[in-house]
Amino acid sequence: MSFIRNNTRSIKLGSVTIGGGAPVSVQTMTNTDTRDVAATVAQIGRTVAAGAEIVRLAVLDERAADCLAEIVPESSVPLVADIHFDWRLAVRALEAGVDGIRINPGNIGGADKVRRVAEAAGARGAVIRVGVNSGSMEKEVLARHGGHPTAEAMVESALDKVRLLEETGFRNIKVALKGSNVMNTVAAVRLWAEASDIPQHLGVTEAGDAFSGTVKSSVGLGLMLAEGFGDTVRVSLTAPPEEEARTAWEILRAVGLRSRGVEFISCPTCGRCEGPLFQLAAEVRQRLGDVKAPLKVAVMGCIVNGPGEAKEADAGIALGRESGLVFVRGRQVEKVPFDRLVDVLEQEVRNL
Ligand code: SF4
């Protein structure tokens, strides 16, 4: 399946191109105290290993902004400073070397301050992401929309904020319209694409724990991406940011936009299942978590339906009684007892 991607303007966030048909990039956000440089750098490293291509950090005070000067050189991906209320923190973060900032131009002290931030970002070629969150919208905008953060209200709020920036001549902008209501967010993203060519960052905010967040993000991001919207994505989970990055990649893979690492296929099991499939599937996933090549690996519970699926994959196993069959690229290569099955499958995958 091929996509017609929504046509957005192309901007550069450090080494990452956003919009203009560039691949949709995966973003996450650290949850360490940014003033703890060692912990933050370590977490950025883990998220990058899990597939993050852009990382955002909360900058709450001047010390945090200054710590960015030590964090930026240690990061292999562009960093975005998340700023609220204080325009001076935005300028300080830019001086510390971040490639982007996330602000709400409506809450940093008026047009003059917006101009100062835009000038600082412009001088460094940095991106400004304008965020609209359904939970914290301006009273006046809400009043014009019956008191509710409707899709129209979110777009109006974003357009107001973008106007403040564009009036300064700044164009290196990305927007994010996020709501915790999935279908409302989807509607806002569609409307935005009609109103502007500014690239969009997609996400369903406050989506919940790993279970409900994954479901909501998969539905929301899946719909938006399948309609061709979105230039960067974040899956928000009440879980470590590495999980967010992994989940984002699974969603991009499921809609056929990008792939990275092993695609796992396993059966739900039924009365035909011949062995400890749940345990084996979990172990295979854990062992192959570091493989970056886009390979398909199947773990199937019986020799009735298992071999067909295992043969379709790059490598796979199908359980029989006390032993399993191992397949590589459509060929049965070995019959192995359960206790050695994962070792053999892992070796075959690594050989590929
Ligand atoms: S592969 Fe076999 S064990 Fe797994 S669900 Fe299908 S029939 Fe059941």
Image (tube, rainbow, N blue to C red):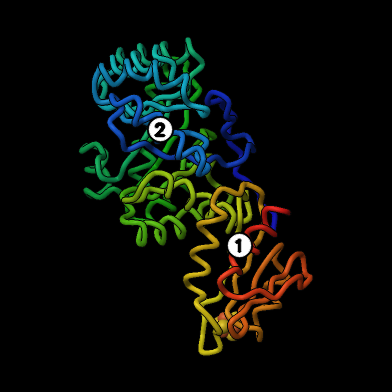
* Quarter of the rendering containing residue 40: top left
Q: Nearer the viewer, mark 1 or mark 2?
A: 1
- Decide: is 75 above or below 52: above
Regarding residue 194, the answer to whether it shows in the image is no
| Residue placed most toward the observer, 282 or 57 | 282
Q: Provide the secondary structure element on which disc 2 rests.
A: helix
* Quarter of the rendering containing residue 330: bottom right
Figure quadrant, ligand 1: bottom right
Residue positioned 39% across, 14% down in the render: 96
- The answer as to whether callout 1 falls within 8 Å of ligand 1 is no
Location of residue 163 in the rendering, given as x and y in whole percent from the top left corner: 40, 25
Looking at the image, the residue that sits furthest to the right is 331
Q: Is residue 68 left or right of residue 256?
A: left
| Residue placed most toward the observer, 184 or 178 | 178
Looking at the image, the residue that sits furthest to the bottom is 271
Q: Quadrant of the N terminus?
A: bottom right
